[in-house]
């Protein structure tokens, strides 16, 4: 989580997280991603397991072969507990968008791939 921790107090506050995320997503899209995350987090542990992630990804309109998703999921899951926290889920989405040749660094680019 250090990459979010702008003031180096070892604590990522909401503002830092939102600042980071807003560089990648337009506000409406970020909201949609957050809604999808919460909706598919069936056991409400603030993490998405693989099958929850898969449903959320498809819900958000990303079309990806299951084996590719599994690969990207495992890459993102750096502590290998089989679950993604919200920012990893966002990273995963960005990775998937990049793979399709869309760069996801500016919100406007993200908007363009929005269906
Ligand atoms: Ca969960
Ligand atoms: Ca994990």
Image (spheres, grey):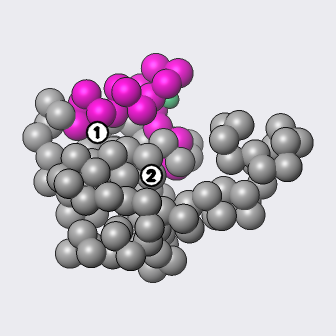
CA gap between label 1 and label 2 equals 16 Å
- Provide residue 16's location: percent of width, then percent of height: 72, 58
Verify whether residue 101 appears in magenta.
no
- Provide residue 27's location: percent of width, then percent of height: 51, 77
Instruction: Give the vertical position of 89 relative to 109 (above or below).
Output: above
Q: Residues within 10 Å of mark 1 (few under 14, many from 20)?
A: some
The image's mark for residue 51 is: 1
- Provide residue 97's location: percent of width, then percent of height: 27, 55
Please state which of residues 105 and 94 is positioned toward the viewer in this rendering. Answer: 105
Verify whether residue 72 appears in magenta.
yes
Q: What element carries label 2?
A: helix
Residue 9: name its quadrant: top right
Q: Which residue lies furthest to the right in this view?
A: 9
* One can see residue 42 in this view: no
* Residue name at image x 44 percent, y 71 percent: 107
* Residue name at image x 32 percent, y 58 percent: 103
Q: What element carries label 1?
A: helix
Please state which of residues 35 and 94 is positioned toward the viewer in this rendering. Answer: 94
- Provide residue 30's location: percent of width, then percent of height: 47, 69
Q: Residue furthest left?
A: 65
Q: What stretch is highlighted in magenta?
A: 69-86
* Residue name at image x 20 percent, y 75 percent: 115
**Pointer 2 residue:** 90
* Residue name at image x 61 percent, y 58 percent: 20
């Amino acid at each position: 989580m250090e990459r979010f921790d702008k003031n180096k107090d070892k604590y990522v506050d909401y503002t830092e997280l939102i600042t980071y995320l807003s560089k990648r997503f337009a506000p409406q899209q970020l909201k949609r991603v957050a809604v999808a995350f919460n909706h598919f987090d069936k056991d409400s542990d603030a993490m998405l397991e693989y099958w929850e992630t898969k449903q959320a990804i498809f819900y958000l309109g990303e079309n990806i072969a299951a084996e590719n998703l599994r690969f990207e999921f495992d890459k993102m899951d750096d502590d290998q507990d089989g679950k993604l926290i919200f920012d990893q889920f966002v990273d995963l989405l960005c990775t998937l968008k990049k793979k399709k040749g869309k760069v996801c660094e500016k919100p406007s680019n993200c908007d363009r791939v929005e269906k």
